[in-house]
Each structure stands twice: as structure tokens, then as C-alpha cells.
Image (cartoon, grey):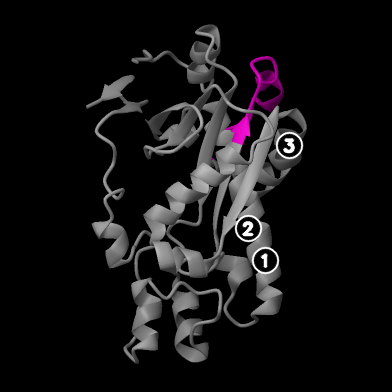
């Protein structure tokens, strides 16, 4: 199926609802590139008549913290359904980041109290969903249901990392939320990894092996993730930058 591009964040949902393929769920993750803390995945269904109440929706990375916090209860209020899944660092290490990401998306959609007629995922093909689906490149900035899922996941994870800062003092989780920064790397070198760190990430693994940790890019993934058969982007997905299916 090809959905042609038109302007607006709600184009995909509107087209799918008009085609009789609703309810439309969006699914997105936060914390993929962090070296500590969980991977958090959210799925969200926004009804066609409820989107006007969420006009400020956008990719959570483009919104400030205050705006995300303002939108968080509104999304929960106006969403037809939503579900948030937390995948802890141990499972991320065991599965690899990408496989854990895909599994989290499956769980988030499966946990929705309504069965979606169609699922839009942010960037990745997600096999095993209970409905037809379409991966959307840049989906959290292009589809309202994905943007809503992005905000739900981001705020849920940020709040957890702030609480985790009290349980594991000294790492600065409340500030960097588990991502690799100079301050985080310095704390790791001084304190060593906590139970919330991902040992599959190279900067954490180096410390375990007695090597200097250094600072790494936040999207560093372990070798298993790079070799995973699910690690490559699907050959067919909707690219909002081009307005057509990419092949």
C-alpha cells in the first residue's frame, strides 16, 4: 500500500481511518541509545475526533521537558487507548538492543485494551503484530499516534530515571537519564557500573574488563545487535521525507 504525502502530522491516521483501517495505533521507543536504565516502549491510539485536543504534539525530542510534561496527562486523557512497556537493562543485554526494541513494540501493542486495525511503527518493521503495520521513517515527527507514543515513553522513562537517581546516587541519572555524557563517564570510572547499567554497551563493558571507559556515542550498540537478522531497516517502509514507500 502506498500512502501519498500531504501536509500535517495527522495525514497517515486520517488516510487509514478513511480507508476503514482503524483504530490506528502508533508505537515508539525511548532509551535505545542509553547505556543505563530501561528501554521504554509505548503504543497509543488516537481517535480521529480527538486529535484537535493535542495540536501541540510533535516528536518528543523536539519538545522541551515542560511541554512534554504538559502533554503527558492530555495524551492519557484523550487517547482511545495506550500501553507503556519497560524492558530492563538485563533483558536489553540478553537480547541486544534492536531485538529488545522489537519485542517491546510487540508487547506495547499487545497490551492495548483495544485491538488496532493498523499499526504505525517508528522506523522499524515489527513482525508478529496482531494487525497490519507500516514502518514510518521519522514517524515520531510525522504521525500523531507515533508522536503521542513517543511522549508517553519519554516522560515515563525520564520520571523513572529521576527516581533511580535516589536509589543509585552519584551517577547523575536525573540529569543525563542514562545516556553517555562526560559527567556520566566520569561517574562510571569512579563508581563502576551499577545494576542498571547495560553491560553490552562498550563503555560499560570496558570498565568491567578493566579498560578505560571513555565517552561513546549514544547510539552505540553491542555486536549482537549489529549482527541481528532484525538489525537492518526493512526494505519497504513509508518515508515521510519522500512521501512514498521506500524500496
| Disc 3 from disc 2: Cα separation | 17 Å
Task: Judge the density around disc 2: few (<14), some (14-19), many (≥20) Cα neighbours within 10 Å.
Answer: many
Q: Residue at x 56, y 38 (%)?
A: 109
Residue 247 image offset from top left, x and y in percent = 22, 27
Residue 61 at least partly seen: no
Q: Compared with residue 58, is residue 24 higher up or lower down, i.e. above or below?
A: above
Disc number at residue 177?
none
Quarter holding the N terminus is: top left
Q: x, y percentage for residue 50?
A: 70, 20
Q: Is residue 127 left or right of residue 39?
A: left
Q: Nearer the viewer, residue 26 or 100?
A: 100
Instruction: Identify the residue at horizontal 34%, vertical 74% (top origin).
Output: 202
Which stretch is magenta? Answer: 44-59
Specify the label residue 162 is tagged with: 1
**Is there CB contact under 8 Å for labels 3 and 1?**
no
**Membership of 56 in magenta stretch:** yes
Q: CA distance from mark 2 to mark 1?
A: 6 Å
Does residue 138 lie above or below 240 as drawn? below
Residue 181 pos. (x, y %)? 45, 70
Mark 3 = which residue?
76
Q: Which mark is residue 158?
A: 2
- Residue 233 occupies which quadrant of the picture? top left
Label 1 SS: helix
Based on the picture, tell me whether residue 229 belongs to the magenta stretch.
Answer: no
Q: How far from the left and from the top, in percent, is residue 35?
A: 45, 68
Determine whether, in the image, residue 42 is placed left or right of residue 224. Answer: right
Amino acid at each position: 500500500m502506498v500512502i501519498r504525502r500531504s501536509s500535517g502530522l495527522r495525514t497517515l491516521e486520517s488516510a487509514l481511518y478513511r480507508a476503514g483501517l482503524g483504530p490506528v495505533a502508533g508505537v515508539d521507543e525511548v532509551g535505545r541509545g542509553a547505556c543505563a536504565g530501561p528501554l521504554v516502549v509505548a503504543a497509543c491510539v488516537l481517535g480521529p475526533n480527538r486529535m484537535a485536543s493535542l495540536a501541540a504534539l510533535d516528536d518528543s525530542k523536539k519538545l522541551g521537558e515542560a511541554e512534554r510534561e504538559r502533554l503527558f496527562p492530555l495524551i492519557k486523557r484523550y487517547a482511545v487507548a495506550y500501553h507503556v512497556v519497560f524492558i530492563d537493562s538485563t533483558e536489553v543485554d540478553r537480547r541486544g538492543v534492536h531485538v529488545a526494541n522489537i519485542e517491546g513494540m510487540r508487547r506495547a501493542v499487545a497490551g492495548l485494551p483495544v485491538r488496532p486495525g493498523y499499526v504505525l511503527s517508528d522506523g522499524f518493521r515489527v513482525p508478529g503484530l496482531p494487525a497490519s503495520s507500516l514502518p514510518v521513517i521519522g514517524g515520531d515527527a510525522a504521525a500523531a499516534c507515533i508522536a503521542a507514543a513517543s511522549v508517553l515513553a519519554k516522560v515515563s522513562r525520564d520520571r523513572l530515571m529521576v527516581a533511580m537517581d535516589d536509589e543509585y546516587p552519584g551517577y547523575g541519572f536525573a540529569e543525563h537519564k542514562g545516556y553517555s555524557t562526560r559527567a556520566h563517564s566520569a561517574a562510571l570510572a569512579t563508581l563502576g557500573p551499577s545494576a542498571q547499567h547495560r553491560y553490552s554497551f562498550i563503555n560499560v563493558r570496558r570498565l568491567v574488563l578493566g579498560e578505560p571507559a571513555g565517552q561513546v556515542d549514544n547510539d552505540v550498540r553491542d555486536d549482537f545487535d549489529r549482527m541481528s537478522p532484525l538489525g537492518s531497516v526493512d526494505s519497504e517502509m513509508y518515508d515521510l521525507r519522500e512521501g512514498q514507500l521506500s524500496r
